[in-house]
Image (cartoon, rainbow, N blue to C red):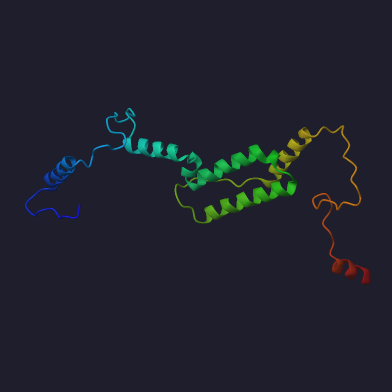
Amino acid sequence: MTERKPLGMTFTSWIDQQVQEAAERGAFDDLPGSGKPIPNHGDEDAAMAWIREKVRKEGIPAEHLLPTPLKLRKESAQLADTVQDLRSEAAVRSAVADLNERIMKWRRIPIGPPIFVPLVDEDAMVARWREGQATAAPPDEAPEPRDRSEPAERADRPAAVRWWRRRGRDRR
């Protein structure tokens, strides 16, 4: 379609002429879907039906299409449901801190619809995680004896005092 519309011709007639010439050349022969009926989506908006179909074909999750505040709300609800799957209290606190940081970042400069997104209560999430851990391991079982030659897990022991701080205490 490199040629320009002639001055005395309307756009409609010029386009019709171009389509007719292309059909005569056979440009529309053997197109995919030729001879098949156009899918009827009922009373739906045709543009939205096309978008939904494209998203379905591409396999894009619907969550990716949500505005940011709704994504954050959905993520906080999912965190509440999956908090028991995390390995330690530190991991729970880290996940909550990360989510709260993103919520605060969105609150500073909200883009999109004005939807309030509450912060996630870190202590409530940790309590929920502890409840899940208590039901997962029966209290009757004693912990397995640990071989002393193996180093202790960092989460099991208290925070180590640095050697220079211990040294300073000894001099007092």
- Kindly tell me whether residue 172 is visible in this rendering: no
Q: Is residue 97 above or below residue 53?
A: below
Q: Is residue 147 left or right of residue 129?
A: right
Q: At 90% from the left edge and 47% from the top edge, which residue is drawn?
A: 147
Front residue of this view, candidates 53 and 143:
53
Q: How many marks?
A: 0
Q: Is residue 159 left or right of residue 29?
A: right
Front residue of this view, candidates 31 and 5:
31
Q: Is residue 6 left or right of residue 120?
A: left
Q: Position of residue 32 (x, y in %)?
A: 31, 36
Q: At 18% from the left edge and 40% from the top edge, which residue is drawn?
A: 23
Query: Which residue appears farthest toward the bottom when viewing the image?
Result: 171
Q: Is residue 132 above or below residue 171?
A: above
Front residue of this view, candidates 11 and 137:
11
Q: At 79% from the left edge and 50% from the top edge, which residue is drawn?
A: 155
Q: At 50% from the left edge and 47% from the top edge, which residue is drawn?
A: 68
Front residue of this view, candidates 30 and 68:
30
Q: Position of residue 92 (x, y in %)?
A: 70, 46
Q: Quadrant of residue 79?
A: top right
- Kindly tell me whether residue 3 is visible in this rendering: yes
Q: Position of residue 148 (x, y in %)?
A: 91, 50
Q: Is residue 78 above or below residue 43?
A: below
Q: Is residue 82 left or right of residue 40?
A: right
Q: Position of residue 72 (x, y in %)?
A: 55, 45
Quarter containing the C terminus: bottom right
